[in-house]
Image (cartoon, grey):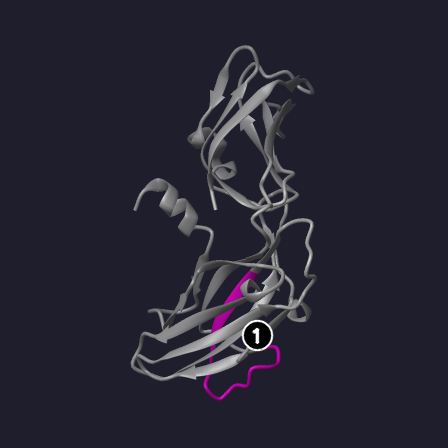
Amino acid sequence: MNKLRALAMSVALVAAVGGAHAFTLEPIMTLLAPSGAGSVVTFRVKGDGQSRVAIRFRVMTRDMQVDGSEVNTPADALFLVYPARVVVEPNGQAAVKVQWKGPAKLDAERCFRFVAEQVPLDTGAQGSGIKIMFKYIASLYVGGSSFAPSVKVKVVGAMNAEKASGFLVEIANSGSRHVVLGNPKVTIGSAQIVLGEAELGTLAGTNYLPGRSRSLFILKEGAVEGQPYDSTLEFESVY
């Protein structure tokens, strides 16, 4: 698997609460249209074990904070999920349809998580306090081909809590579509200070959602506190 392929795969998250995988989910990333035939997608689950598996499905909103943390809330009013719960026999399969029920016209891509969670066989699909045994979290986007990211970098001289000088680097996506930054490089000022993937740390390989940004303090001697620096950003787009 090449580097960009790995970055693309990182858009989807698989979370295990326990041991071996109880089931698999496909696709792990999908794009829906806000209207028409493309507003429906079919997810498929396959049992991997020797026992029957109960799985419930949900769609959650997806937002990104400046520190990189993700915020999710139920998106029940925007999607039809059918069925909401299945029982898969050993090595069996099941399909679940997800349909966008939100606005038919969008100004920007909407970002969500499709969650498939294994629950105890004797537990209903509803209610809080359900023990989650294993889950897949896939990326689900609603948008169109006309949407595109617009990523820019802003660099300001700063000092950290230990009074060490460096750069406060902010990368923002002011466009209308998400993008993952592959092999990013930031070039700062006339001195041509170059920050590669290693120096950019968590700013690299990150999924920048539309209208969201991330910032990071990068230790560097000689940076002048409060001074803005001309800078450029180069990267490979991964969707």
Q: Nearer the viewer, residue 154 or 152?
A: 152
Q: Is residue 207 visible?
A: no
The residue shown at (68%, 61%) is 104
Say which residue appears at 55% left-offset and 19% top-offset. 188
Q: Residue furthest front?
A: 36
Residue for point 53% across, 65% down? 114
Q: Nearer the viewer, residue 141 or 193?
A: 141
Would residue 55 be found to the left or right of residue 170 on screen?
left
Horizontal side, residue 45 vs residue 34: left or right: left
In this figure, what is the number of numbered marks? Answer: 1
Q: Would you say residue 98 sits in the magenta stretch?
A: no
What residue appears at the point 30 percent right and 46 percent down from the top-left corner? 1
Residue extending furthest top?
A: 190
Magenta residues (range): 113-129
**Numbered disc 1: secondary structure:** strand
Instruction: Kindly identify which residue carries mark 1.
Output: 81
- Residue 162 screen position, x and y as percent: 60, 27
Expressed as whole percent of the image width and height from the top left, the position of residue 122 reads 48, 89
Residue type of the residue flagged with mark 1: Val
Quadrant of residue 225 within the rendered picture: top right
Q: Where 52 sits versus 162, above or below?
A: below
Tell me residue 137's x, y (percent).
49, 62
| Left or right: residue 236 compared with residue 112 | left
Residue 57 vertical position relative to residue 164 in the rendered view, above or below: below
Task: Decide: few, some or many residues near mark 1? Use Cα within 10 Å; few <14, some 14-19, many ≥20.
Answer: many
Residue 196 x %, y %: 44, 27
**Per the image, is 120 magenta?**
yes
Using the rendered view, name the quadrant where residue 142 is placed.
bottom right
Taking depth in this image into account, of 72 and 35 the one nearest to the observer is: 35
Q: Is residue 153 visible?
A: yes
